[in-house]
Image (spheres, grey):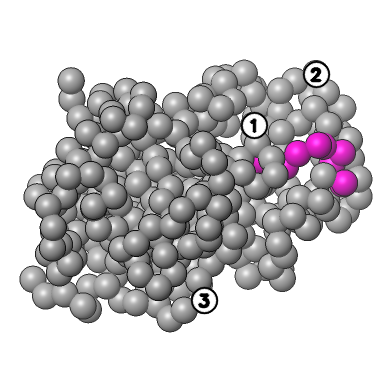
Amino acid sequence: MSLINKIFSIKNETDFNSVALEVFNFQYQNTAIYRSYIDLFKSKKIEHYLDIPFLPIQFFKSCKVIAKKHSIEKIFQSSGTTQSNRSQHHIHNLTLYEESFKIGFKNLYGDISEWTVLALLPSYLEQGESSLIYMVNHFIEKGSSESRYIDFKFDSIKLLSDKLRDKKVLLIGVTYALLDLAEKGSVDLKNWVIMETGGMKGRRKEIIRKELHKQLKSSFNVDFIHSEYGMTELLSQAYSKGNGLFSSPPWMKIIIRDFEDPFSYKKPHSSGGINIIDLANIYSCSFIETQDIGKEVSNGEFEILGRFDKAEVRGCNLLSF
């Protein structure tokens, strides 16, 4: 079985550990920046995925993180105000990304063809080269014929709520855009799934998720607000069906690191920095130390609590080749 097939066939912890070690060995041998970083810290034999060092996410802002001798099919970029401070994810195989987001969504929500997908993502469309837009474009293409991008016009939403009353509807939107829409008035979308992607993108004052969801639930007459957790540097997403509790696909794992010691990990229900293992990200780096703060709750579920407030580290400046 190929390594890619192994990744999407993971069923338990033993499978995950075995595939994670295989992916790590491939990336250590082939991803130069990751190997150089690991060689600075590696002091013991790596026999379990918890022994694997995590690459700080800042490296994606200043380095090309991709396996040697592998072509680049696409470069995704994070949102940002200038070209210099946008993370870049060099993608060797877009089909692998598509496989990851299709299976990840289907595991929780069913086949995308059963859904009408409405997307409210203006800032991502403006920035261009967004991995989220690539995924949503695919969802719109594979969803029902009514699937499309929408605007802020309140009357348009009211018309759609009547037209699609008996359909499975997914409204996915960036946080500030959903809030802008909610503040235009109340509309009954009780049969819809409202999914926020997080972030105000500098457009509005940040608010805590609990208050955000309370406002959106009230305006849209829904019991729960769903959430998507992903980032430019990954090829997989975690989803929450409500109450801010996220779950990941079998090939993705969230590990909470200690605030003071990045090589120590916290027990469940303790907050710390979020490390992510995304085994689908095989041609880049699957082991990433993020700047998000969270905690593991139970059964692999986790919460996102915020972000670190600290100076940016330019990773490549720390290393020489």
Q: Looking at the rendered structure, which numbered label has been put on residue 76?
A: none
Quadrant of the image for the C terminus? bottom left
The residue drawn where x is 24% and y is 29% is 4
Residue 243: in sight, yes or no? yes
| Residues at marks 2 and 3 touching, judged by CB atoms closer than 8 Å | no
Q: Nearer the viewer, mark 1 or mark 3?
A: 3
Q: How many marks?
A: 3
The residue drawn where x is 17% and y is 67% is 41
Q: Is residue 317 left or right of residue 291?
A: left
In this picture, is 102 found above or below 185? above
Classify mark 1: helix, strand or loop: strand
Q: Position of residue 125 (x, y in %)?
A: 56, 52
| Residues at marks 1 and 3 touching, judged by CB atoms closer than 8 Å | no
The residue drawn where x is 29% and y is 49% is 50
Residue 71: in sight, yes or no? no
| Label 3 environment density (alpha carbons within 10 Å; few <14, some 14–19, many ≥20) | few
Magenta-colored span: 218-228
Q: Nearer the viewer, mark 2 or mark 3?
A: 3
Classify mark 2: helix, strand or loop: loop
Q: Position of residue 114 (x, y in %)?
A: 62, 18
Give the amino acid at mark 3: Asp
Q: Looking at the rendered structure, which numbered label has been put on residue 166?
A: 2
In this picture, is 260 found above or below 289? below
Q: Earlier in the sequence, mark 2 or mark 1?
A: 1
Residue that mark 1 sits on: 117
Real-space Cα separation, disc 2 to disc 1, in angstroms = 14 Å
Give the amino acid at mark 1: Val
Query: Looking at this view, is 161 or 208 the one in front?
Result: 208
Q: Is 223 inside the magenta-drawn segment?
A: yes
Residue that mark 3 sits on: 309
Give the amino acid at mark 2: Asp
